């Protein structure tokens, strides 16, 4: 099967590297690979396949690609694609679910340690050449509640267990799961929040999860608990979080995602003393291409082999 393929690169997945690997794996591949999105999308009239980050896609891209049959996202989150009003019903959308466990888990541990040990205070003391010591709280013995139990949550749970933590999940799944001490239905999210020393949001953004972590859920948390959002900004009620922080009803928060991205300079979260902010880096890694390419290659092999129904990680069809 022959198909016109467009690849839109990004710094962590450059077009030249993808082109070199893909042309080595597929003979006579009809491929346009470019790091210039505008140049790439000018050539979509006969394109069947577009591969790129979820933020590369908008209504104009879809409108200019009448023969498009498959979008391969280079990210696990595809909400920006799925909400496009002119997304054809028959279009296949796949993602790279399953590859982000190591980097997201490591970021969560950075956040948990920074919050638990008040590392920002240490940095302020270093800048002021101030020698100040205090008892260091441990992660050992603490309880983490992970909202959204998928591949990333499973990777995080394994690492939490290595630190001697209890792990609970909130999910639509039932039964027992390795490295989880308990699973709770979404209807019991507020109860699960009462157990948490760390409430970690990892759930995809859908209409059902929009502002899932709301005033009621945050109010259920213990005064010494921390909230961490590495999911999507929309799953958290940021106003409810700010109010809880200012009233000292929870101990602090760490956020990697926001309802508005980039986070505006005037946003009050920047000035909250008990908040650790990172610029949406959770899914990034220095080996991103090596992580993503095998999955994309396997999907390309299936598609070019005439088996689009067998594509891996289908999120829409």
Image: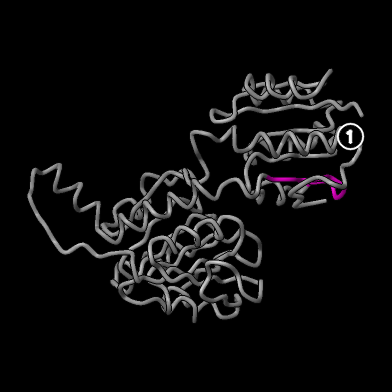
Crowding around mark 1 (Cα neighbors within 10 Å: few <14, some 14 to 19, many 20+) is few
**Could you say which is closer to the camera, residue 300 or residue 257?**
300
Image quadrant in which you'd find residue 176: bottom right
Residue visible at 46% across and 57% down in the picture? 159
Residue 285 vs 253, above or below: the answer is: above
**Could you say which is closer to the camera, residue 130 or residue 29?**
29
- Chain part drawn in magenta: 86-95
Residue 261 percent across, percent down from the top left: 49, 45
Residue denoted by label 1: 305
Residue visible at 36% across and 48% down in the picture? 266
In the picture provided, is 45 more to the left or to the right than 83? right
Residue 252 vs 33, above or below: the answer is: below
Please check the rendered image and state whether residue 131 is part of the magenta-colored stretch, yes or no: no
- Quadrant where the image shows the N terminus: top right
Please check the rendered image and state whether residue 94 is part of the magenta-colored stretch, yes or no: yes
Residue 141 percent across, percent down from the top left: 35, 71
Residue 296 vs 150, above or below: the answer is: above
**Could you say which is closer to the camera, residue 117 or residue 90?**
117
In the picture provided, is 171 more to the left or to the right than 309? left
């Amino acid at each position: 099967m022959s198909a016109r393929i467009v690849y839109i690169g990004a710094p962590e997945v450059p077009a030249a590297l993808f082109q070199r690997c893909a042309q080595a794996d597929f003979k006579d591949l009809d491929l346009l690979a470019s790091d210039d999105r505008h140049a790439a999308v000018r050539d979509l009239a006969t394109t069947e396949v577009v591969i790129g980050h979820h933020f590369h896609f908008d209504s104009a891209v879809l409108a200019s690609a009448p023969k498009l049959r498959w979008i391969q996202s280079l990210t696990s989150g595809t909400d920006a694609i799925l909400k496009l009003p002119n997304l054809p019903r028959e279009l296949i959308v796949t993602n790279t679910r399953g590859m982000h466990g190591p980097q997201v888990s490591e970021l969560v541990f950075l956040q948990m340690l920074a919050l638990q040990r008040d590392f920002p205070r240490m940095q302020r003391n270093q800048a002021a050449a101030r020698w100040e010591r205090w008892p260091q709280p441990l992660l050992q013995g603490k309880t983490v509640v992970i909202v959204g139990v998928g591949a990333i949550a499973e990777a995080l749970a394994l690492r939490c267990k290595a630190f001697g933590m209890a792990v609970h999940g909130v999910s639509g799944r039932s039964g027992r799961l390795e490295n989880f001490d308990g699973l709770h239905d979404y209807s019991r999210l507020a109860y699960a929040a009462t157990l948490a020393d760390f409430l970690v949001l990892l759930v995809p953004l859908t209409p059902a999860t929009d502002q899932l972590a709301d005033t009621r859920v945050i109010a259920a948390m213990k005064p010494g608990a921390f909230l961490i959002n590495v999911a999507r900004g929309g799953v958290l009620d940021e106003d409810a979080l700010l109010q809880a922080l200012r009233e000292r009803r929870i101990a602090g928060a760490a956020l990697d995602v926001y309802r508005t991205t980039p986070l505006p300079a005037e946003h009050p979260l920047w000035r909250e003393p008990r908040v650790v902010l990172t610029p949406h880096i959770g899914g990034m890694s220095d080996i991103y291409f090596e992580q993503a390419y095998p999955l994309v290659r396997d999907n390309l092999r299936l598609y070019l082999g005439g088996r689009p129904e067998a594509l891996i990680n289908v999120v829409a069809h």
